[in-house]
Image (tube, grey):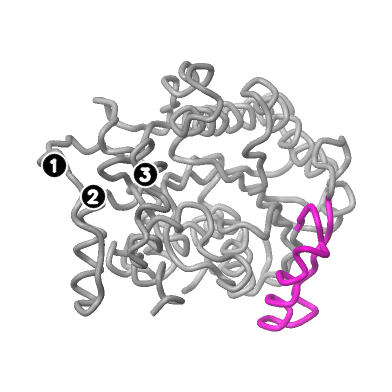
Amino acid sequence: MAISETPAIPLGSWVLVTGINGLVGSHVADQLLAHGYRVRGTVRNAQRCAWVRDLFCRKYGDEAFQLVQVEDLSIPGAFDEAIKGVSGVVHVATILEGLDPKELFAAISQLDRNVLTSAAAEPSVKRFVYTSSTQAASTIALDDLEDKPVTSDSWNEVAIQKAETGSPSDHKRYFNVYSASKALSERGVWDWVKQHKPGFAINTVLPSMCFGASVDPEHQGHASTSIWPAAIFKNELESVRSSIDALIPIGAYCVDIRDVGLLHVAGLTNPTVQNERLFAYGTPFFWSDVIAVFRKLFPGREFPDNFPDQDRKVNLLEVEPDKRSEELLREMGKSGWTSLEEILMANVSDLV
């Protein structure tokens, strides 16, 4: 897969990736390294995440990768040292739990400002990519889709309004809080850029539900939402049934984590991509589709019964901005979004 012949930042440049130990961050780093960039990744505990350094140094060489610890993300200047000398920043790290909504939103906003401020103070930084989510723009659950098209100006106002309602332990409330945090934090990033006018171009990437293989299944397992197809494949649906029923009872939109990594590379290196929101809704699916794919590929295995799909009476979203992201994937050598069958096969590749 190729990048632009005249990339926005030169090949061999250092790129900072925050939250590199997560599913998205690790794939972003893997794609950057594979395309000829050097990566410096941040984690909160370098000792606990030593596997990240071991993995990427073994795969790409000691000179291509550095792991640094940023323990307290809330301190202004926390990223100053990590950002020194880099040409690009991919800010993936966020805060997901442990606070009430208002405190959570404030903590994420502080984290984002810290990374942006450090990047703006470093003259070498020419590109900045922020990891958002399609949940910042709209819901992706097929049973709860809004009856309006998604545009580059869409924001999930419904989730912001609902974030304060429901029990703190309720799955649905957590999903609304997560969605609201993504909407408010991404909007805050754009507001910061408008106010401070930094010397770098910025793009955001908005992935839907990320399925696919972890870069290191031994240490990451089936990370984030990839745990759901894995549980279905292992015929252990009951272990995740409560969260599925509460959040996406019949299906949603999903995207291959490798496509997500590539879109971050495009946002960082493609000179034609500036100040854009790169949407990655990808492929709509019903849970019964997931089970059908597994039955087709593995006829000898037992799988859960089909989900009730409410006769599939769903008007899918019109997502015009997805076409731009698919175009960028084609420019990088892909035919478009990875198919559901390929995504699911990758998701359970360590279990076969």
Outermost left residue? 311
Q: Is residue 207 magenta?
A: no
Corner quadrant of residue 331: bottom left
Left or right for 199, reference 23: right
The residue shown at (41%, 20%) is 158
Using a 10 Å C-alpha cutoff, classify the residue at mark 3 as few (fewer than 14 neighbours), some (14 to 19) or many (20 or more).
Answer: some
Q: Position of residue 131 (x, y in %)?
A: 57, 45
| Three-letter amino acid code of the residue under disc 2 | Phe
Q: CA distance from mark 3 to mark 1?
A: 17 Å
Find residue 236 and name its label.
none
Find residue 286 and name its label.
2
Corner quadrant of residue 268: bottom right
Which circle's residue, 3 or 1, is located before the other in the chain?
A: 3
The residue shown at (46%, 34%) is 171
In front here: 29 or 116? 29
Which circle's residue, 2 or 1, is located before the other in the chain?
A: 2
Find residue 244 and name its label.
3
Find residue 312 and name its label.
1
Reply above or below: 246 against 29: above
In front here: 129 or 59? 59
Magenta-tinted stretch? 42-70
Q: Mark 3 near mark 1, Cβ–Cβ under 8 Å?
A: no
Which circle's residue, 3 or 2, is located before the other in the chain?
A: 3
In front here: 350 or 238? 238
Using a 10 Å C-alpha cutoff, classify the residue at mark 2 as few (fewer than 14 neighbours), some (14 to 19) or many (20 or more).
Answer: many
In front here: 324 or 113? 113
Q: Which quadrant would the C terminus be assigned to in this image?
A: bottom left
Using a 10 Å C-alpha cutoff, classify the residue at mark 1 as few (fewer than 14 neighbours), some (14 to 19) or many (20 or more).
Answer: few
The residue shown at (71%, 36%) is 112
